[in-house]
Image (cartoon, rainbow, N blue to C red):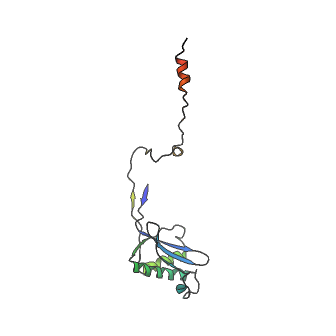
Amino acid sequence: MFLIELTLDRVFLDRSHRYLTARIEHASGETVVSASTKEPAIQKHLYSVTDVSAAENIGRILGHRCLQFGICKVFCYNEEDKDSEKFQVFLKSLEEMGIELQEPDEHEEPFVPGVNYETVAEHDIGVVPPTVDWDITRHVKDKFKFH
């Protein structure tokens, strides 16, 4: 099993049918820097707010804002947008602004033999242990019959 260290800031490009929004998210899940075609200062300079040129410009603006905040390395992992032309142009414009796209270090989890019963639930095991219904008085009465 491989674990991914998520200590780097992550970059996202959110696309809707009306706007593009790019953001840098800290490892804690909080958005640190963002840029969107919803912003009037950006929107007034674009012909279309959802096309490839808009994605390129959002990448440039986000890259500039990242450098202002001191962010120079980000982690990009987005499988569904991997082949999208908008996403590729966006990433290329981030790199042109000096933002380094970096993969996080992967390390193998050390093997510990045995089962950690603190984390295993009954449904994980697959077999529910039988319940024992002991009525002690019935067994004692049968064993010791007094006449």
Residue pictured at 39% horizontal, 64% vertical: 105
Quadrant (top left, top right, bottom left, bottom right) of the C terminus: top right
Instruction: Give coordinates of residue 115: x percent, y percent.
Output: 43, 44
Q: Is residue 38 above or below residue 1?
A: below
Residue closer to the observer: 67 or 145: 145
Task: Kindly tell me whether residue 121 is visible in this rendering.
Answer: yes
Q: Is residue 74 above or below residue 60?
A: above
Looking at this view, name the residue that lies furthest to the top. Answer: 147
Q: Is residue 60 above or below residue 123?
A: below
Q: How many marks?
A: 0
Query: Along the horizontal axis of the image, is 68 left or right of 147?
Result: left
Instruction: Give coordinates of residue 77: x percent, y percent.
Output: 48, 67
Looking at this view, name the residue that lies furthest to the front. Answer: 147
Task: Kindly tell me whether residue 98 is visible in this rendering.
Answer: no
Instruction: Give coordinates of residue 22: x percent, y percent.
Output: 51, 76
Residue pictured at 54% horizontal, 73% vertical: 14
User: Residue 49 is drawn in which quadrant?
Assistant: bottom right
Looking at this view, name the residue that lies furthest to the right. Answer: 17
Residue closer to the observer: 103 or 35: 35
Q: Is residue 129 above or below residue 71?
A: above
Instruction: Give coordinates of residue 133: x percent, y percent.
Output: 55, 31
Residue pictured at 52% horizontal, 18% vertical: 143
Quadrant (top left, top right, bottom left, bottom right) of the N terminus: bottom left
Query: Along the horizontal axis of the image, is 147 left or right of 31?
Result: right
